[in-house]
Amino acid sequence: MTPPTKQAETTHLPILSSSDQGWDNIVVEQFRYPAGEGHCYYTDAHVICLSLSPRPINFLQVYGSKTYRGLYGKGDISIAPAEVPFFARWDDEDHYLQIRVPSQFIQRVACEALEMKGDRLELMPEFRTRDPQIEAIGSMLLTELQQKTAGNKLYIESLANVLTIHLIRQYTAVHTPLPIYEGGLPQRQLMHVLDYIRDYLHQEIKLTDLASLLGISEFHFSRQFKQALGITPYQYLLHQRIERAKQLLKESDRPITDIAFSCGFNSHSHLTKQFRQLTGMTPKVYRLR
């Protein structure tokens, strides 16, 4: 599980890449390679590789001065810190998900969410390891990558924040407990955020947009928002968009595609999928009823 060399990139491109979908603060790519070898060196990003191979593959891996020889199977994870040269050789077709987290983003989250000095963070390299939380987040990111739903950026940002907090807590030289914040957002601040969501429901709303309204970090905002309402910002935004769609379906004869765009969905099918998940029926059936 290794990113290709610059030479290999010309012939082996990712199957899917979040770079084509405009994700912020994280790069997620799905790769499939025949047996071979490769080098990589990222100066500004930490790299997580999650094996998707259905059968174990024999690897030789070298991170700096550390070497690993052994099998990687589905769910196994490796972590390569930024600025650490990485070499790998594998004996069979490799299929994996690569997640790159920019160093600056990890430093910012460490400062804002954990009150740490981000420039002193040292991420530790990991060979074949298992981590259920990273595997679960990787699976959710892969699903979003495959669905190509550009309207879910708030959800992607939330996953990026959770993953970054987990990396800092579990894979840095210093393990730091999360600070505890009680009570959730004060009512005045909460109403300010809810009013903003209502007024800009038709537009793309990012987690950073909502947090900046209150001048706090994205992690603190998400945590306190959920404490206040019992659901995440993404869940609340989705519910509000579905409620707006219901209103328009009942009170107008506008085309469903038009309603989808006016409620912040990027297509008729995107609205239909989310609408069915929350109501058990399609927008068309809801309108007929």
Image: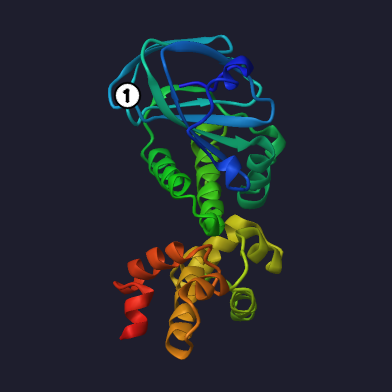
Q: Would you place residue 51 above or below residue 222 in this image? A: above
201 on left or right of 55: right
User: Which residue is situated farthest in the bottom direction here?
Assistant: 251
Q: Residue at x 67, y 61 (%)?
A: 216
Residue 53 occupies quadrant: top left
Left or right position of 116 against 68: right
Q: Amino acid at mark 1?
A: Gly
Q: Is residue 45 left or right of residue 274?
A: right
Q: Nearer the viewer, residue 108 or 260?
A: 260
Estimate the x, y position of residue 75 in percent, counting from the top left: 34, 31
For residue 198, above or below residue 155? below
> Could you say which quadrant of the image residue 286 lies in?
bottom left
Is residue 244 visible in the rendered structure shown here?
Answer: yes
Where is residue 285 drawn, in percent x and y?
32, 78
Residue at left offset 49%, top offset 80%: 244
Task: Report the label total.
Answer: 1
Would you place residue 16 above or below residue 238 in this image? above
Q: Which residue is found at the position 66% from the left and 51% from the top?
A: 112
Q: Which colour scheme appears in the figure?
A: rainbow
75 or 31, nearer to the observer:
31
Find residue 235 and report its horizontal and vertical position in percent: 46, 66
* Quarter of the figure with the C terminus: bottom left
- Give residue 236's position: percent from left, percent from top: 48, 71
Which residue sits at x=62%, y=15%? 7
SS class of the residue under badge 1? loop
Is residue 61 among the parts visible in the rendering?
A: no
Front-most of residues 77 and 51: 51
Q: Is residue 23 above or below residue 229?
A: above
* Residue bearing the label numbered 1: 73
User: Dot 1: few (<14), some (14–19), or many (≥20) neighbours within 10 Å?
Assistant: some
Quick one: quadrant of the N terminus?
top left
